[in-house]
Amino acid sequence: MSVGEPLLQVRGLTKHFPVRGGIFLRTVGQVHAVDDVSFDLDVGETLGLVGESGCGKSTVGKALLRLYEPTSGTVLFEGRDVVAMNRAELRRLRRDIQIVLQDPFESLNARHTVGKILEEPFVIHRLGTPAERRRWAAELLERVGLPAVAANRFPHEFSGGQRQRIGIARAIALRPKLIVCDEAVSALDVSIQSQILNLLLDLQREMNLALIFIAHDLAVVKHVSDRIAVMYLGEVVETATADDIYAAPRHPYTQALISAIPVPDPTAQSDRVVLVGDVPSPIDPPRGCRFHTRCRYARDDCGHIKPALESVHDGASVACHYWESVSEAERLGGVGT
Ligand code: SF4
């Protein structure tokens, strides 16, 4: 990795899943889960990847680690091509990139003690003696706010928040450079959410970690992200710094998501933009702008001509033909004003 180069460079990442049908289970279509997604991530930076359920954000996270094989595109980590890596190279890569899932039960073996779960990464990578691994596991537990004796218990004996701490402990065991947090706090109560977010931010500062924070809720990523990428139906429709995107969202979809964030003041007037209609099927996504079937600013050509994700200002980018007039209309109070 050369000086000044991003830690992670994603270009044109695409993942389609085949749809099979008929008695011979032939491929009869493709689910366009992710189409042509590109972004960079610097050392120690946090990118929030947001969008409604099913927009492809989790598929992006898993494709970065090759938990899903990308259909096309390139993923460069420290300049190395992840998509071209063989099994041995991928195993080494997983020391550097880890994932924390929404449900730690998916990644924590219910039949193993927590100690064994935390020692496993060291066993896989042939690090330390058994006594050292036990000591490292105890240190990891203490680092995430759990007592060392928790090593003797099983995952089901812990609450959801504690299990997520165990998931994070395992993720940091090999001192990675990047952690993908895939809806890591979505299933937790609000007070527990903030404890886990604070833990992740502390670890980030301590270890100079880069984070990709995947969430359907913009309120969750608002305070932890340096930059945000908004996805709709498999595509990135807007990127900007967190401050910029919350202060002045340019894409009509981002505007709708931000307007849905609850305001703490009950007397404040709600300007919520209600999205009409359902999310279209990713098997047959709309032509032109994929958002045109739900966009309150759509014009005739939006259904025919696909807007490119274009750089608009200070590293921000937006995929909308009419983002300037849309932004002006929003400033004046919405469509038709
Ligand atoms: Fe709406 Fe058209 Fe912009 Fe798409 S290109 S977001 S349909 S105004």
Image (cartoon, helix red, strand yellow):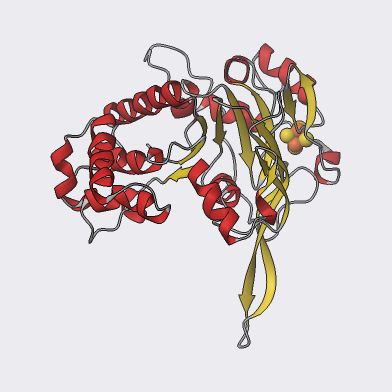
Total number of numbered discs in the rendering: 0
The image quarter containing residue 22 is: bottom right
Image quadrant for the N terminus?
top right
Q: Position of residue 240 (x, y in %)?
A: 66, 23
Q: Nearer the viewer, residue 333 or 114?
A: 114
Q: Residue furthest front?
A: 129
Vertical relation: 304 (above or below) 172: below
Residue shown at 73% from the left, 31% from the top: 297
Q: Is residue 96 visible?
A: yes
**The C terminus is located in which quarter?**
top right
> Foreground: 230 or 95?
95
Residue 219 in the figure: left or right of residue 117 = right
Q: Which of 212/83 is in front? A: 83
Residue 100 versus residue 328 in the image, above or below: below
Left or right: 174 with respect to 70?
left
Q: Judge from the rendering whether residue 287 lies leftward or rightward of residue 137; answer left or right.
A: right
Residue 53: x %, y % from top left: 51, 46
Residue 292: where, in percent of width, then height?
Answer: 73, 41
Question: Which image quadrant is residue 309 in?
Answer: top right
- Looking at the image, residue 91 sits to the left or right of residue 331; the answer is left
Residue 197: x %, y % from top left? 37, 27
Given the current orientation, which residue lies at the most extreme bottom position? 23
Q: Nearer the viewer, residue 102 or 111?
A: 111
Identify whether 225 is placed above or below 22.
Answer: above
| Residue 298 in view (yes/no) | no
Residue at screen point 34% across, 46% down? 128
Q: Quadrant of ligand 1?
A: top right
